[in-house]
Structures are given as C-alpha cells and as structure tokens.
Amino acid sequence: MAHLQVDLVAADRKVWSGEASMVRAPAADGDVGILPGHAPFLATLRAGTVRIVPVSGGEPRRVTIDAGFLSVDFDHVTVVVDAVTEGETPSGLTTPTAG
Amino acid sequence: MAGQQRVYRQRIKSTQSLKKIFRAMELIAASRIGKARSRMTAASPYARAITRAVSAVATHADVDHPLTTERPENNRVAVLLVTSDRGMAGAYSASVLREGEKLIAEQLERGKEVVLYVTGRRAVSFYTFRHRELAGRWTGASDSPTAETAQEIANTLLDAFLADTDEGGCGELHVVYTHFVNMVTQTPRVVRMLPLEVVEGVMEPGEEPLPLYEFEPSPEVVLDALLPRYIQSRIYSCLLHAAASELAARQRAMHTATENAEDLIRMYTRLANQARQSEITQEISEIVSGADALAAS
C-alpha cells in the first residue's frame, strides 16, 4: 500500500519529514484525517494538535500548532504552520534529519 | 629627534591594537556567516510550500483579493529599507540607503508620497539626522532576524496597505534589501512586494500542472489565510538575505582593514628605524666633533 510523504514545516525550519500512514489535522471546519489516496486538498488549519502516524510503527507523533494550512497532492502532505510546540512526543521516536 | 621616535612607536602600538580588533571582528563575522546561511536554507521549505499553495489557489480560482489589486487612487507608497545595526561593514548600509534614496526620488517624481519603514540602526540614524519622519523602525537584530520579527514587520506593512486611503493607507509597498548572491557578491535590490503579482511569476517552469484541489472552507478563505503568510515569508527571506550579506560585507571590510593596519605598522616601523638611525648618527657626530674640539684645544 502506498504511504503518505509528509513534510511538517514551520516558518524558520523543517520540523518533521518522513513517511506516514495517516495524518490528522484540525482544519477550519473540523478535524480531517488524511489517508493514502486522498484527493488533492487544501485547507486552513486552526489551533490544535496535528497527529502523524509514522509508517515505521510506534507511537503517533503529536505536535501542537497555532495556525497554518495543509495541502495534499498525490500522497504528498505538506503541513505548514506558523509556530509549533512539540506536544506529547514519545521519547522513542527520533526526528529524521531534514533533507 | 628622540620625540620623533616615540611618536612612531606610539602609532605602531595603537595600530597594533586596532588590528587585533579588526581581526576579531573578521573572525566573528566569518563564524556567524555559516549560521546565517543555514538559516536561509532552513527557511526555504516553508517558502516553497507557501508559494506552491498560493499558485494552486491562484490557478484554480479566479480570485480578486485586496492584496493583489492595484490601488491607483492611493498616492502613498510604503518603502521598507533593510540595513544593519552596526557599521564596520564597508559600504553595506550605505549602498542600501543610496538605492533607497534613488527609489524615493523616483516615487516623488511620479507624484507619490513616500512613507518610510526601516530596519537597522544605521538607517534610523541616517534619517533622524536628516529630520525625516519614520513610520516604523525595527532595530537590534539585523544579523540574526527571527520569524517573529518578520511577522511583526509583515503585519505592520499589511495593516498600512489594507488601511483606507484617508486613514493613511499605502497603495504600494517596495522593499530595498541586499541580495546574498555568494560570499563575494551581494547586490542591493529593490522589490515591489505589494500589490502582489501572483500567478505568473510564482510558478516555476518545468513543474507539472497543479492538481485540481478541493478547498476547505473555500478558495477565498484559504487565499485570505495564505497571502499574508506569503508576504511574511517573502519579508523573512529578505531579512535573512540581508543578514547574510551584512556578515559577508563585514568580514570582507574587516579583512581589508586588517591588511591596511599591517601596511601601516610596516611603514611606521621603517620610519621609526630611520628616526633611530638618524638619532644615532647625530649622536656620533656630536661626540666626534666634541672630541675633535677637545683635541684641538
């Protein structure tokens, strides 16, 4: 099965990048969940928690954001946020280095 | 004659301590440049994502946004000058100010009124000395700008742009900053940032056509959220370019200053040696003539 290629970027750096099987984000009108094969999609985000389930298994990664937007195109998900605070990140999950 | 020698020695000493300062500043600038450049690369994924999203909305929907519409009835033009906080960077700030003055003169010729916004203490002192009014100023972090500063600047400028004409709104926004080409070349640049010309210039050639997006809640709302961020990211990238340019200019200026100090030290050493030699010669001739006079009597 195809995976999602996820980039989570803040204004001054790339926060996380890697493969995921699901992304959940707080869109303006309610939370959205993105699975592989989703139609091209562009939404604004409100303050809340973005949850990324990595392909490699393990705990989902959660980050708290204040505002931003999300774009999905052909299994490539880009979450662009203004400011991000790491929330409830399990210690076992290491951040892949930004490529 | 002994006085002459002392003067030279003093000059050598002071030039030597200046040289140490120049050398230190060169090394500091050199070490900060790497950080400034990596910040430039770190900010580029964000800029790319935003640009792509903006062009996605712009190609999809026929949008008419206040930030993209021309406002010919508005006579005011906002100009943002990006300079450094400190000098010792050669012509870095001076050339930005010169470009800025040229732009201001052009705008005045077009019959516009110029509203000045500046970052960096050099520009602030330049304009306060000339008793010119500044609508906004940001100082203190010209060599390591943060995203927050960029956001603050962007918000101020967007407010100015979106305000009504009678309430001091501006019809255009130009930014003068120094573009970092490489370590040797940094060129001052004038960019018209608002009103935005999206669509054409934004999409890079060779890219595959953008997919037909679904928008949530609606294309207008998405664009409304995107465009201010786009401006902010553009301004942030200007600030980062300016910071890297400032450090590169400072490193080069301080390198030249160190070399000049070395030249001066060499010259003064020669002069001091000459003075010492002529003093010795004079003393010898005095002793000899004194001895001759004694022998003659």
Image: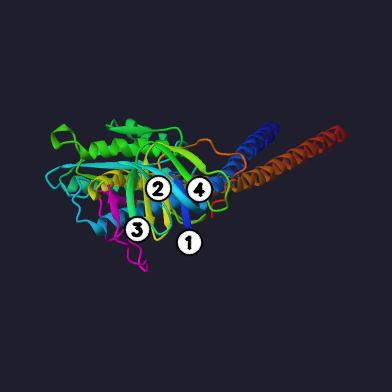
Residue A27 as seen in the image, left or right of residue B255: left
- The residue pinned by badge 3 equals A39
Which chain letter matches label 1?
A
From the viewer's side, name the closer residue of A74 and B83.
Answer: A74
Which one is earlier in the sequence, the residue at label 4 or at label 2? Answer: 2
Magenta stretch in the rendered image:
B190-216
Which one is earlier in the sequence, the residue at label 2 or at label 1? Answer: 1
Q: Residue at x 14, y 42 (%)?
A: B74
- The residue pinned by badge 2 equals A33
In three-dimensional space, the C-alpha distance between marks 3 and 2, rounded to whole angstroms, equals 12 Å
Q: Residue at x 23, y 48 (%)?
A: B220
Which one is earlier in the sequence, the residue at label 3 or at label 2? Answer: 2
Same subunit, tags 1 and 3: yes
Q: Position of residue B216 (x, y in %)?
A: 28, 48
- The residue pinned by badge 1 equals A2
Type of the residue with mark 4:
Val
**Secondary structure mostly seen in the magenta stretch:** loop
Determine which of the numbered discs, if any, sits on residue A53 in the image. 4
In three-dimensional space, the C-alpha distance between marks 4 and 3, rounded to whole angstroms, equals 19 Å
